[in-house]
Image (cartoon, helix red, strand yellow):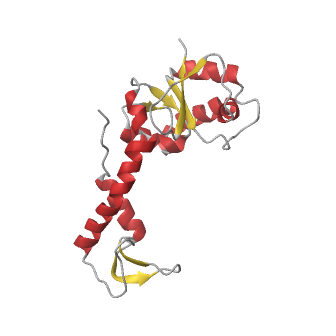
Amino acid sequence: MKPRHRVSRAAIELITRFEGYRRKAAQLPDGRWMIGYGHTLTAREGAEVSEEDAEALLLYDLIAVSHAVNEWSYAPLTQLSRGLIATDLHYGPFLLALTPHSVLSAPYHRLSAGIIATNRIFTSPPDEAHELLAGQRVTYVMICARPDVGRGEASSLGDQLHHGRFPAWLEPVPLAGPQAFSVYRLKS
């Protein structure tokens, strides 16, 4: 059974603050109309909407976003045994919110040790990275599945993983469905 993730109240509040409320429809540079909190699907010239209805339109618009998150991004990771994931720090909040896993780093200032450790892991040569991962008791290493997104020196673990090369102490983890990420498990 696949988990069904929902958009949190905090996400809705963030979007409403970012978008701002538009009572009356406004025309965008591309000719489309927008109303409420960024709604374009049914917006038209002369339309007006209350804040309550604008939020309802936003919730409707976010159904597709929730579906995408469930089906194409993080849901396959929920099928793995719980573990500690080392990955780009920007994925941390989503992994924490949408999966049962823990993360080594996330973009929070109080996690500076984890941020530094993650940077060292992905920018170090594979043998050094292995020692760092083992020292942190990391279970999985996760990267964006796009092979054109490399970083670091060619000798670094991060660059090698982004180009489809992985050391013998990592094993690819097969996940069902379309993949936004490549996941590797540290061998025992």
134 sits left or right of 160 in the view: left
Query: As drawn, which residue projects farthest toward the right?
Result: 154
Residue 64 rendering spot, x and y as whole percentages: 37, 56
89 sits left or right of 64 in the view: right
Identify the residue shown where x is 55% and y is 15%. 187
- The mark tally for this picture is 0
Which corner quadrant holds the N terminus? top left
Query: As drawn, which residue projects farthest toward the top?
Result: 188
Query: As drawn, which residue projects farthest toward the bottom?
Result: 46
Residue 110 rendering spot, x and y as whole percentages: 47, 41
Residue 159 rendering spot, x and y as whole percentages: 70, 35
Q: Is residue 88 above or below residue 11?
A: above
Q: Is residue 159 above or below residue 64?
A: above
- The reply to whether residue 113 is in sight is no
Identify the residue shown where x is 66% and y is 31%. 164
- The reply to whether residue 173 is in sight is yes
Residue 176 rendering spot, x and y as whole percentages: 44, 32
**Which image quarter: residue 182?**
top right
Identify the residue shown where x is 66% and y is 36%. 162
**Which image quarter: residue 24?**
bottom left
Q: Is residue 164 above or below residue 26?
A: above
Identify the residue shown where x is 38% and y is 60%. 14
Looking at the picture, tell me which residue is in the foreground, 17 or 35. Answer: 35
Query: As drawn, which residue projects farthest toward the front?
Result: 177
